[in-house]
Image (spheres, rainbow, N blue to C red):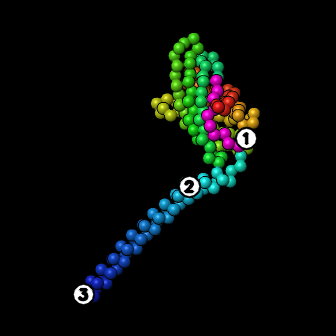
Amino acid sequence: MSTYFLQIDSLSSNIIIGIVTGVLTTALLYLISRVFIEWVVPWYRSIKYSGIDISGVWETEQEFELSREYSLLNLVQKAERLDGLWTISITENESSHNEIKTYKVEGIIEDRFAILTAKNTDRRQIGISTILVEATGNGYELEGSEVWYSVDNKKIKTNSIFFKRKK
């Protein structure tokens, strides 16, 4: 009778040990894959990337019907991936009223063409924009077009855009 209980006890402990080692193995493999995806792959891509580097601070001034805008685009580049912040200062014409908007920017660059998507960081406001620019002027200028949703006109609008690298 006592050998029967020892066999059940041994069987249940083997099952528990199997489950615990399976969970630990899964957690270890998950951590290894995350390290590989988050650190090793970006590191390798940055070493392998041989295109133009457009990271840095870019500035532009634009005139519109009702306002003029001055903006700074701060880009961080890792291989072909682009991330950053775009801060726009909007001044209404014939007014001293000034509004600041900040957008989170993500995108990619291929050859000398960059595609950027900007989303307003203030979730209480609508704000989205897509920008396609070409690096020109020995890499110190970005020239292209912007498409955005105009809250004032309640329409999707487009305009040319020209950034210069800030010194």
Instruction: Residue at 57%, 11% (x, y): give it.
Output: 94
Earlier sequence position, callout 1 versus callout 3: 3
On residue 120, the disc is none
Q: Amino acid at mark 1?
A: Arg
Residue 59 drawn in magenta: yes
- The percent position of residue 112, horizontal first and vertical second, equals 73, 41
For the stretch drawn in magenta, the main secondary structure is strand
Towards the viewer: 48 or 8? 48
Q: Which residue is mark 3?
A: 2
**Segment colored magenta:** 52-61
Instruction: Residue at 45%, 63% (x, y): give it.
Output: 27
Residue at disc 1, secondary structure? loop
Quarter of the figure with residue 75: top right
Instruction: Residue at 33%, 77% (x, y): give it.
Output: 12
- The percent position of residue 149, horizontal first and vertical second, equals 59, 28
Earlier sequence position, callout 3 versus callout 2: 3
Q: Are marks 1 and 3 in contact (CB under 8 Å)?
A: no
Instruction: Residue at 68%, 42% (x, y): give it.
Output: 53
- The percent position of residue 42, horizontal first and vertical second, equals 60, 53
- Mark 3 closeness class: few <14, some 14–19, many ≥20 residues within 10 Å: few
The correct choice, above or below, for 28 with respect to 66 in the image is: below
Res 17 seen here:
yes
- The percent position of residue 25, horizontal first and vertical second, equals 46, 68
Q: Are marks 3 and 2 in contact (CB under 8 Å)?
A: no
On residue 39, the disc is 2
Residue 161 drawn in magenta: no
On residue 112, the disc is 1
